[in-house]
Image: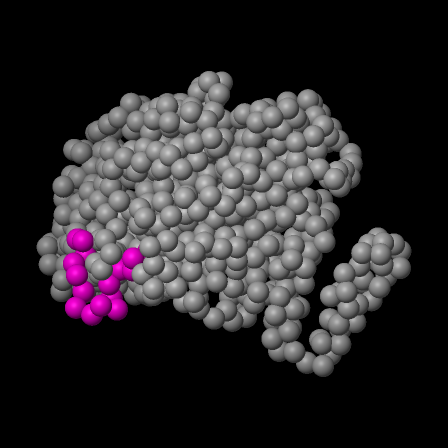
Amino acid sequence: MQCKEPLFLLFLVAMAPALFGVQGNVLSTPARLPKDFWEKKSLYYSHQHPEGSAEESPEDAKTREIVIERLKSRNSGDDADQRLAEQRELIAPVADRIQRKWDDLSTMNFTALMWEIDNELPEMNDRKGRTRGARGLPAFLGNAMKLLDLKQVVKEIETSVMTSVSCSACKAGVGLLQHYVDSGKSTDDIIHAATKLCVSMKIESRRVCEGIIDIMAEEVVYVLARLILTADEICGFVIGDVCAIPYNPYHDWEVPLPPIPKPGAVVALPAPNVAPLKVLHLSDTHFDPYYHEGSHAACSEPLCCRLTDGIPNSPSDGAGRWGDYRKCDTPRKTIESMLAHIANYHQDIDFVIWTGDLPPHDVWNQSRSDNLYVLRETVRQLSFYLPKARIFPALGNHESSPVNSFPPPNVEAQYAMDWLYDELDLLWRRWLPDSTSPTVRRGAFYSVLASPGFRIISLNMNYCNNKNWWLLLNSTDPAQELQWLIYELQSAELKGEKVHILGHIPPGHSDCLKVWSHNYYRIVNRYEATIAGQFFGHTHFDEFEVFYDETYRGRASSVAYIGPSVTPYYGLNPGYRIYHVDGNYAGSTRTVLDHETWIMDLQEANRHAVESPRWYRLYTAREAFRMHSLTPQDWDHLVQRMTYDDNLFQTYYKFYWKASPVRPDCDAECKKRLLCDLKSGRSNDRKLTCQEIEERIDAKKSSTWKTWLFNGFALSSLFTFLAGFGWFGSSVPSWLF
Ligand SMILES: [Zn+2]
Ligand SMILES: [Zn+2]
């Protein structure tokens, strides 16, 4: 239940014209680009498509000429008017025809239209039917539209499991969109066509179509009009590996590490007789001020359970008192019930980490002021129920409007993030020292010495969010956040401090840009001895991500905890997390010693319509998973064990869904995907990370006596061997055998 905003990417990918309205003529506004942008781009293209190569077909050669010609024309003074005129001339016949076709979308024959486009644009297919075009209408559009399976695309977007289906849809949508932008269509025209397309193809309800297009159009077109990336490049950037990311020098960067050698491994153990700290982790509250008990919970929009969804005929379709397993966010009374319970049951909390996503999922009709209201209201709720708590917040992807839109500093004033970051600075300062203000106002990240020898660093993970379209313009370490992180970690290392890192989007999740994620992974590995814990949210599930040594990939080097969501959105019980962290003493490791997940059984609470539902501890990690301790190596072992032990995996799976009674079954493919997630501290790296685990599950699935014998023998002999050498001393757990 990733906060996937299923519509957004779908819009972006399949119906992209929808997103790209623009005020006036987009190309008449001078682009803010590096001086050598077009020159580099031209060189890059020439390099990718060398003249006279043996494999080059006449069509390829012609395409290359056209693209380089266009790039050069931009290079020579960047005359926008001339460029626009040339492009208009080039595609005018097709644009006219498309215009006529758009006029009757409901009866349009996409296949025929795309066939015409394919045959009229000067950009040719190569022999294998692949496009070589730059910014015209890609020739694969026809094939993509023919193959377009919108239901499949929606499913893939919701589950974050992208395949070539989403990739084709993305390329089709983006290609069409670029065509509109390049042909100089007005914002209103684009919005009009897009809305019609969205409604007539029943992608969403009319109000959702209209709302989302209206909110996002201006910004997305602003970005698109300043890009010369091909649809291939854009989709590779957004979707990741399955879309075969073409090499792009603008999105290939590395933040330098200081030339200070990594300290040697020192294994420090927690002091045995010191009481651990108790840390509360709240994430993804998604408070819905308009939740209405009894309203329609089975609506067809991305968020239901509001008066505007109407009252259903059947009571079973009505929204529950304390929330609903369908697409509904958290009612006020559920948040208040949880906070009152926490204040009552966990009076010994030392501090709170709070990893973002506060507004509800009605992203098609949100404004900046709506989101600021929810932010202020959630801060008020926390301050009211936990007045003495020290709270360390991090920013989610839903806090902005439009959702996911987080331009880096130095954009034009009208797009700047001051409206949100200044407010965060104001609201967060009740818990944070004044020293955090400059970085919060710059990029919504900060570093705080929480107690002597212990630092908390909160990151704004929206600078790795692949749905943050601003990063298409320049993804290079936005706001210099990673450079700053390295500085903070290096200082901490030199001072002997331990660090906890907080953030919203997990760094290994497919929503986190590959290049950012790979840089972050390198940083975590360099400072593994300093980073004692990492804590994220965003997926709404109860899970974790293991990081591995980059040289010796078998050695787990760090673990990131992904705390469960407060919102039941969707199919989940509401929940929160408690960590027991090595405590406050000189030389403390500050590592997580154990953790608990607490939930409310939504079904039970709604069934009895009780006044105060019961919140209870669902499980404790070490006990539930029979773990000796919670080192990165222990989490890696757990993943290994789950590949063989299906009962153990089913226990994990139940907790992953916070024991939701509506959780689906998990087949072998699902198991492979979830276990691979656990090994993915680095995004878009599944092939390398997960091949072994997938093979093992496949082997087990088609289990022959040989594989059974091999697996059983290999495991037991390995651990007998290790035990014999005293690696586990006398603590070899009996489950190993
Ligand atoms: Zn969320
Ligand atoms: Zn999120």
Give the image quarter of residue 108.
bottom left
Q: How is the image coloured?
A: one colour
Task: Give coordinates of residue 691: x percent, y percent.
Answer: 62, 61
Residue 187 inside the magenta-drawn segment: no
At 45% from the left and 54% from the top, the residue drawn is 615
Can see residue 511? no
Q: Is residue 253 left or right of residue 641?
A: left
Q: Is residue 354 left or right of residue 175?
A: right
- Front residue of this view, candidates 6 and 142: 6
Q: Quadrant of the C terminus?
A: bottom right
- Front residue of this view, candidates 284 and 86: 284
At 37% from the left and 53% from the top, the residue drawn is 612
Give the main secondary structure, helix, strand or loop, of the magenta stretch. loop
Q: Which residues are magenta?
A: 307-324
- Front residue of this view, candidates 196 and 131: 196
Can see residue 104? yes
